[in-house]
Image: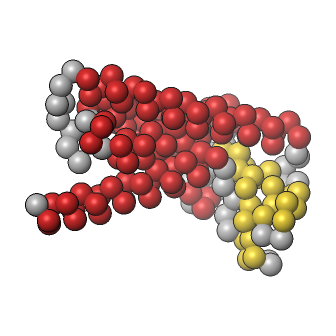
């Protein structure tokens, strides 16, 4: 996972991947806007036996970690999300895109998801979650489009790292 600029084209090529980040932000915000406009808090709509759409609010982090901490966490997660976003943006602009497509795609997804959730915290004071997967009465914590993008991006980073290690071993 090199961060050296190979030539002047590295940053310009990475900017194209920011379209993916933008797509994540727009789809995340449009889906949340639909949920906020059409469902009341905790309203549940069964889509299928394993999936509900349920409007929930998360003032904490993943799995509602730090959710009941008195409000300081809102600004902490705004600053954290913006900081991570800036670091990822800087990293993206320094990558050799043609050789590192999986890494760049993962970073672009994480960037879009992080900014999508920061927007929620700034507008609502919490993150709007609504995808609720379950098996019978066992529920996975609710999530949203931004969370999905962050998860897929993280998986791509892990796969990229594993492939880098294997390429290094065979070289």
Residue 48 at least partly seen: yes
In the rendering, at what x and y percent does residue 169 appear? 14, 66
Q: Is residue 100 above or below residue 56?
A: above
In the rendering, at what x and y percent does residue 104 appear? 37, 41
Q: Quadrant of residue 122?
A: top right
**105 relative position to 51: left or right:** left
Front position in the image: 67 or 89: 89
Label total for image: 0
In the rendering, at what x and y percent does residue 155 appear? 44, 58
Which part of the image, by quadrant, shows the C terminus? bottom left
Q: Give the residue drawn at x 39%, y 26%.
A: 15
In the rendering, at what x and y percent does residue 26 appear? 64, 31
Q: Is residue 82 above or below residue 70?
A: above
Which residue ends up furthest to the left in the rendered image? 171
Front position in the image: 75 or 94: 94
Front position in the image: 65 or 145: 145
> How is this picture coloured?
secondary structure
Q: Give the residue drawn at x 37%, y 37%.
A: 88
Front position in the image: 60 or 133: 133
Q: Give the residue drawn at x 43%, y 32%.
A: 17
Q: Quadrant of residue 67?
A: bottom right
Q: Give the residue drawn at x 62%, y 58%.
A: 64
Residue 81 at least partly seen: no
């Amino acid at each position: 996972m090199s961060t050296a600029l190979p030539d002047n084209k590295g940053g310009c090529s990475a900017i194209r991947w920011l379209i993916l980040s933008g797509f994540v932000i727009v789809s995340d915000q449009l889906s949340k806007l639909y949920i906020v406009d059409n469902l009341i808090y905790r309203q549940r709509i069964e889509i299928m036996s394993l999936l509900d759409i349920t409007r929930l609010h998360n003032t904490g982090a993943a799995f509602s970690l730090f959710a009941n901490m008195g409000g300081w966490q809102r600004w902490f997660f705004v600053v954290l999300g913006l900081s991570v976003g800036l670091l990822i943006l800087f990293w993206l602009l320094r990558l050799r895109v043609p050789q590192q497509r999986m890494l760049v795609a993962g970073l672009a997804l994480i960037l879009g998801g992080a900014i999508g959730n920061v927007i929620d915290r700034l507008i609502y004071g919490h993150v709007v979650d609504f995808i609720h997967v379950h098996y019978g009465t066992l529920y996975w914590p609710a999530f949203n489009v931004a969370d999905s993008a962050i998860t897929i991006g993280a998986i791509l980073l892990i796969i990229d790292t594993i492939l880098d290690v294997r390429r290094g071993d065979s070289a």
